[in-house]
Image (cartoon, helix red, strand yellow):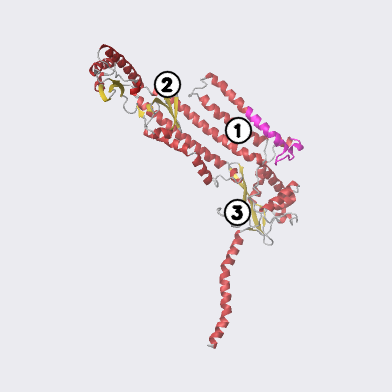
Amino acid sequence: MIAMLQLVRTLLPALCALTVLLLQAPGAHAQEQSGLDSWYRVTEVNPGLGAPPGNIDRTTPRSSLESFLFRADAEEWGQAAHMLDLSAIPPDEQAKVGPERAEQFATLLDRRIIIDWYDLRDRPDAVDARTTDAPMAGEPRRSLLLWYVKLGDRPVPIRINRIKPAVGEPVWLVSRQTVMSLPALAEAYGPTEFELMLPEPLRQKAFWGLRWYEVGAFPLVVLITTLVGFLFNKAMSKGLGRTHRDSPTSMLVATRGPLTLAVVTLTMSVLTSKVFVFSGRIDTVLSPLIILGFVVATLWLIVNVADVILSRLVNFDDEELAAMGDGMEQRRNVATRISAARRAVIVIVVLVGAGITINEASVMRSLGVSLLAGAGTATIILAYAGRNVLTNIMASLQIALNQSARIGDKVIYQGRFCTVERIHFTFVQLRVWTGSRLVVPVVDFVSEPFENWTMKEHFLIEQVVLRLSHKADIEALRRKYEQILDDMDVPEDRAEDRGVYVKGHDVFGQEVVFLVPTPDPNLAWTMACEVREALLKEARKLDDEAQAIFPEATPAEAA
């Protein structure tokens, strides 16, 4: 027993030590792995520049960029070069090339980059502790994206990296890849020849990060662009004098608006890239607008040219399409389907244009106004605000697919005799027989029943209802009715559609319906009115000659 206790006393410290080691091993391994992922390892940081001055702080992303800007404002390019990763440059050339790259980076910061200081972390590991939704939330960072700058056909990322030398603490520097791209970026976005010709006072800082020449040049650029657009539009309008100015089949009319927008956008692009290179604050707004201008002009031109071609191939005139005859049914079907195809093309064009704009305007991501990050909230807001519009668009496509109403069809909608003039994205345009226009949301139009007089069968039977006395001679009126229809050249092959019927009665008299066969829906309502007028005329004659035809009731009794 004593020997057992001595053995336990001997092994207990060893077991405790082993337990502690086992518990600490995963944490130590994780810490070591985290340290490896938190920076890029190099042998030495910028050995060709010598020891960094003591008045710069490179321990955090924010302090490193602040130190660079302070040195750049003082034009101390040699000290500013210490905030760049010059590891791709031979050490013996770093002292010469470093200040040049620092000046180029300062120019790029001034003209193309806006630093989001709220998003730039002021801690060595650059951990973003504000949110837990981001993929890298709570994780140490060794590379941060500042901006995208377009160089040719590709966007160049501007980054700062955390570098750890073999001896010393890690520091934040402008990335090696960014430093190597600086000469090409400076050539693309540096001062133009025209700027270099300006007096030095005009190139000095004014306010809001702008130079004095920018303060005066921006309104001048807007004025020149507006003038060029006005003159171009005027020149095209002169050309329109040789054609019908408002003709839907005029190619000049169709291309005038899109080409004017394209010329205005091109002028703005040339002035802001070849003559004046504005700072990032202005360029951040201009670049997406220029991209949007080119995209809108191109898509607008495609839609307008397609409209002209369709107008020349297909007649969309509702009065001509409303005519009856051989082939008119097919013409109405074709016109309605092409109108629906046009709407579908416009939707596709708008979606493509939006995609191109978002893809090209990558600067938006650098602003922190991330279109993709805010897509969830934006989608909910837009879907709620535009739910009626989207519903109407889908309903208009539904009409085109099921052909329940076509351009040129005669319909009875809410008691009005109308012709379908146009089926738009969100509304149906109806021309009432009086000449007025009735605009109906597509959803309301398809959700309510309506009569279509030109669907399938053109032959209609109108009804003329007269209230007559119980003593009225219906047979005498029937003979007059047949004579009236014969005089109106109603087709004899539809004689079975004629008829006079007593459909009901009450204490005031009997209701008699006279059927009016009509071969043309366009004339159905008019023919019914003419038959009613003729019947009343004959009824008055019979009323004067024989027994009373009309019921003898006072207005109070009728009410």
Q: Residue at x 60, y 33 (%)?
A: 265
Bounds of the magenta segment: 198-227
**Residue depth check, mark 1 versus mark 2: number of the one nearer the observer:** 2
Q: In this rendered view, identify the residue nearer to me: 368 or 141.
A: 368
The alpha-carbon separation of the residues under discs 1 and 2 comes to: 49 Å
Q: Which residue is mark 1?
A: 266
| Residue type marked 3 | Arg
Q: In this rendered view, identify the residue nearer to me: 144 or 452.
A: 452
The alpha-carbon separation of the residues under discs 3 and 2 comes to: 66 Å
Left or right placement of residue 104 versus residue 25 in this view:
right
Residue 130, numbered label: 3
**Mark 3: secondary structure:** loop
Q: Quadrant of the C terminus?
A: top left
Count residues near mark 3 (Cα–Cα under 10 Å), then give few for <14, some for 14-19, many for 20+.
Answer: few
- Pointer 3 or 1: first along the chain: 3
Relative image position of residue 23 (x, y in whole percent): 56, 70
- Pointer 1 or 2: first along the chain: 1
| Residue type marked 1 | Leu
Q: So how many labels did they put on this image?
A: 3
Relative image position of residue 288 (x, y in whole percent): 59, 39
**Residue depth check, mark 3 versus mark 2: number of the one nearer the observer:** 2
Q: In this rendered view, identify the residue nearer to me: 443 or 341.
A: 443
